[in-house]
Image (spheres, rainbow, N blue to C red):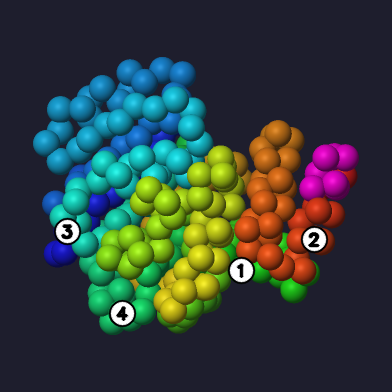
Amino acid sequence: MAAIAVIIVTHDSEKVLVPCMESLARYGGDCTVCIVDSGSSDTSYLREYEAHPHLRVVYQGDIGFGRANNVGYQHSDSGAEYIVFLNPDAFITEHTFSEAVKALSSDTDAVCLGGRLLGYDLETMRPTGKLDSTGIFRKWYGRWFDRGQGEPDSGQYGHPERLPAACGAFLFCRKEKLEQLSLADGQVFDPDFFLYKEDIELGLRVAASRWHTLYAPGVKVYHCRGWQHRQQMSHRFRLMAAENEILLYRKHPSAYLAWAWLKYILVRLFII
């Protein structure tokens, strides 16, 4: 298989990192892995990985998800053909990487690939039987959403297609083209996005190029997702997400900016 470099950003991720790393050890082949810790309160859970020959651990302060991924990208295997941005709460399956390579090999104009993300319950260590994401889409009035999230998995969304953006929990990218789309100093993700919407910003940048983002339903990944319902997401983080939506449309001008401002006001007032 082609050389694959995996980048994982952790932040107090001890509970989920173990099954994530086990899935890579079982199904990842000879991929190299770079773990970037972004300000965990206790980093002792990462020590066991420091001695692995194909694994690098980089310690940072709480610099944010996008910036930490950029750090991992800079420390990734220079000979890799593919770069994988993988959340610590996402677990690959037996054919995840081989199917992703196959899909990108048959679509030479695709920069990034998003797979079929399936829900996973960390408490029972079992799949939920529901979809987590089959790509990120936008409502007619401007709201971004993970297509299929929470729906029972009955095989829907079963055909390859182009996506507006793919969920950042699993992004399988062609390094050669990713380098050409990177920002200053080789940054893949816009560092102005501390957390949330950085995957959509990348998707918009890809869409503005001569290339595209691909959805490949045969590429399956389990995703626990840190929160499953809106009420479990703190007001601070919901406000951050709303602020970043405004920032998104300032960087990529659109009439949807009106929706972003309305959402921000409603979140700030605790109405949504």
**Residues at marks 2 and 3, CA–CA distance in whole angstroms:** 42 Å
Residue type for callout 1: Phe
Instruction: Please provide percent x and percent y for residue 121.
Output: 49, 45
Which residue is farthest left?
A: 53
Q: Which residue is mark 3?
A: 3
Can residue 215 be seen here? The reply is no
Crowding at dot 1, Cα within 10 Å, few <14 / some 14-19 / many 20+, comes out as: some
Q: Which residue is mark 4?
A: 108
Q: Quadrant of the N terminus?
A: bottom left
Q: Which residue is mark 2?
A: 259
Which residue is found at the position 72% from the left and 53% from the top?
246
Residue type for callout 3: Ala
Q: Residue 137: give its label.
A: 1
Can residue 266 be seen here? The reply is yes
Q: How many marks?
A: 4
Q: The magenta stretch spans which residues?
A: 264-270
Tell me if residue 174 comes above or below residue 85 in the rendering. Answer: below
Instruction: Please provide percent x and percent y for residue 210.
Output: 44, 79
**Residues at marks 3 and 1, CA–CA distance in whole angstroms:** 30 Å
**Residues at marks 4 and 2, CA–CA distance in whole angstroms:** 35 Å
Drawn side of residue 255 relative to residue 160, left or right:
right
The first of marks 3 and 1 along the sequence is 3
**Residues at marks 2 and 1, CA–CA distance in whole angstroms:** 15 Å
The first of marks 4 and 2 along the sequence is 4
Residue type for callout 2: Trp
Cβ atoms under marks 4 and 2 closer than 8 Å: no
Q: Nearer the viewer, residue 155 or 223?
A: 223
